[in-house]
Amino acid sequence: MVFREAMDVHLPRISYKQWEVGETMLPEGTDINDVDLDEELRPGDVLYFSGTWQEDISHTAIYLGEDYIIHATGEEGQTTISYMSEYWRDHFTGAKRFDDLTIQYDNEAIFEAYQLLGTDYKQGGTSPDDGFDTGGFVQYVYNEAYHYELPRFGREQWQEGTEVSMEAAEPGDLLFFQGSSIIPALYIGNNQMIVTTVSNGVTVIDLTTSEYWPPRLLGARTYDTDRRDLEVVQIARSYIDHSFDDTSATFMQQLFNEASGIELPDNIDDLQQTGESIHVEELNEGDLLFF
């Protein structure tokens, strides 16, 4: 809960599964009595302990610095701050850092998908208000992020995309799994994905620790989400030397509607407030300039 709310890091629910992800700062087998924790760790790193109530990793705590930790203890029935006493040193396993699992919002699809976490599953659902099924979720995200019209169902989405290996998959690509039907999921990097499940709705899954999803992986697909911009350019070029008896804003409205079905305003003031403002050095084909 702490990492989710503080850093948008979605850790596995169970402590021994958390140990399988992230960056190892102190490996298993480290003799903690030979280590200065303040030299090796920083506040916010996570310590793991074994043998507290079961043989393997069974407890975890956030390091605060100066040999203090904060953790939830069953014995005391509350979240508390403790000193790294002889008891905790005897049970120490290792330490992790999870900075590399922070969700990256510079990808439009990931940003849109993250806003939908917790949305309920609904068979046939295609909107946040009604809920999503698996195909409806990724279709909605691509439409909101890229104005890209994915097919409605996973099997059709699988057929339309361009195959890429898992090693080459990038954040924003789609992963596909074999269930009772073909299930699409949005890859968000770091071996994680966002998918709609019957039990949890829209949720983050870590493929490193999941036992259900990896054996069902069919593959990954990427999509030419910039294609809409090129279509706008091509259509615009086809109008060169043709007359147009209306305003420049109406011309842009017609171009984008013709290219990708996007409904832009038909007056210059509203049009200038639409979309995302960018620096001139970030211009791509199909972006709009205002004078």
Image (spheres, helix red, strand yellow):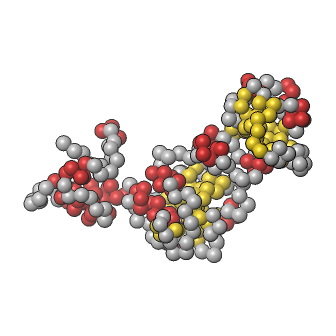
Q: Nearer the viewer, residue 52 or 245?
A: 52
Q: Quadrant of residue 6?
A: top right
- Quarter of the picture containing the C terminus is top left
Q: Nearer the viewer, residue 170 or 37?
A: 37
Q: Nearer the viewer, residue 9 or 215?
A: 9
Residue shown at 88%/38% (left/top)? Answer: 91
Image coordinates for residue 199, horizontal then vertical, percent = 65, 67
149 left or right, relative to 198: left
Res. 52 visible in picture: yes
Image coordinates for residue 164, horizontal then vertical, percent = 55, 57
Residue shown at 76%/35% (left/top)? Answer: 81
Image coordinates for residue 47, horizontal then vertical, percent = 77, 38
Q: Nearer the viewer, residue 97 or 170?
A: 97
The outermost residue toward the front is 77
Image coordinates for residue 18, horizontal then vertical, percent = 73, 48
Res. 109 visible in picture: no
Residue shown at 89%/31% (left/top)? Answer: 86
286 left or right, relative to 31: left
How many circles with numbers are drawn on the protein? 0
23 left or right, relative to 121: right
Q: Quadrant of residue 82?
A: top right
Residue shown at 47%/55% (left/top)? Answer: 112
User: Can you say whether 252 is above or below 133 in the image?
Assistant: above
